[in-house]
Amino acid sequence: MSNIKMIPVLAAFVFLLSCKSPGMIVWRAEPTDNFPADRQNATTQTSQEKTTDSEKTVAEVKAELLERLLKDQLSKNAGSEVLQNSKNNQSAAAGSASSSPSVHSRSLPNIWVFSVGVSSFKDTSLNLRYASSDAEGVYQLFRSVKTSPVPMQRAVLLKNQSAAKAEVIKHLVGLMKRAESSDLVIIYLATHALPDPDTGEINFVMHDTDLNNLVGTGLSQSDIDRIIQRARARKIVFLVDTCHSGGLGNNILLARRGGGIASEVNQLLAQLASSIDGVAVLTASSSNEWSQEDERWNGGVFSYYLMSGLQGRADANRDQVITIREIYDYLYMNVPEATSGNQHPELKGSFSNDLPLIEVSP
């Protein structure tokens, strides 16, 4: 439509150009008074012939010029349309690429990792074999994720001598103060956990815990509750590999209480999960089961399959995000099989099943 509208304009332009061009000849009739009749007729005839020839020449020039201008204009318009179409196609392609859904629809929150493992205790009768290396393995896993590694300023690792009660509380309080309400805090604990007969609370055994003064030297449920209550983060996941039978049989105080300890600890861990909204507690075992560690897994069986699942094997729907439900399902399928049905992980708390824990590579 734009090309048709341009034709009258171009025609007018060409006509004006032909009239005013300095190289164009304009014929005029010569006076006849001083010429003989035959000369007048001859001159008039010649003049008319010249005029006709000149008019043809001008018309041809006009036509050629008009044709040339029209071709140039059409060429430019066609080029503009091609260029515009190219730009439109590029924009459409870019828009399609930008609007295409990502592999996974859930975006991960900022993740904080607090990993504690104690294999070496002041009371050497409590020593474990793999708790500290398991804690380091979980810490390194989150720190080294290719797609979304947890930065050093959002990760804490405390093991053996550095995992004294005061140090654990100090670092956990510091981390919780910095975590925002929309962040996810993952707390991994690998150690013994014991119920206190006087308070009825669970106590996690730290490097310097004295079993004769469990309330004063153990990391108690009350300590954890107070820290969490003051925190802004509303999504907190505990990964607890406790109730280890190894070491307890060597301690006279604990040997007297037998397997009832595991049952009490698991019940108290369930209470911890239900005490605060947004807290999930994934434990290595349930009921009166002990948590096993062995050289077959080069660590605790729970932690072995926990790390295996978080590296990608628990990604049941292949969306490159491991949710809390996916890791639990993976653990519940593999841990009992590996322990001949003697250990069953348990998940309790108030949380969304779709809570993302980690992003993995395809």
Image (cartoon, helix red, strand yellow):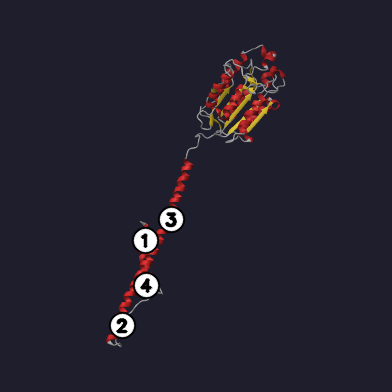
Measure how far apart labels 3 and 2 are at the Cα level: 54 Å
The reply to whether residue 5 is visible in this rendering is yes
Name which of mark 1 and mark 4 comes first in the sequence.
1
Find disc 4 in the rendering and name its residue. 19
Q: Give the structural element (helix, strand or loop) at label 3.
A: helix
Density class for disc 4 (Cα within 10 Å; few <14, some 14-19, many ≥20) is few
User: Which residue is identified by label 1?
Assistant: 6
Tags 2 and 4 in contact by the CB under 8 Å rule? no
Q: Amino acid at mark 3?
A: Ser
Q: CA distance from mark 4 to mark 3?
A: 32 Å
Measure the C-alpha gap from mark 1 to mark 4.
21 Å
Report crowding for label 2: few under 14, some 14 to 19, many 20 or more residues within 10 A (C-alpha): some
**Depth check, front residue: 25 or 265:** 25
Q: What amino acid is at disc 1?
A: Met
What residue is disc 2 on?
43
Please name the residue shown 56% across and 22% down the image.
334
- Badge 1 marks a residue whose secondary structure is helix
Q: Look at the image and tell me in which quarter the N terminus lies.
A: bottom left
Residue 284 falls in which quadrant of the image?
Answer: top right
What residue do we see at 31% from left, 80% from top? 46
Q: SS for tag 4?
A: helix
- Secondary element under disc 2, as helix, strand or loop, is helix
The residue under label 3 is 80
Q: Position of residue 268 (x, y in %)?
A: 59, 19
Upstream in sequence: badge 2 or badge 4:
4
Q: Is 38 left, or right, of 119 in this rendering?
A: left
How far apart, in angstroms, are the residues tagged by discs 2 and 1?
Answer: 43 Å
Q: Earlier in the sequence, mark 4 or mark 3?
A: 4
Q: Earlier in the sequence, mark 3 or mark 2?
A: 2
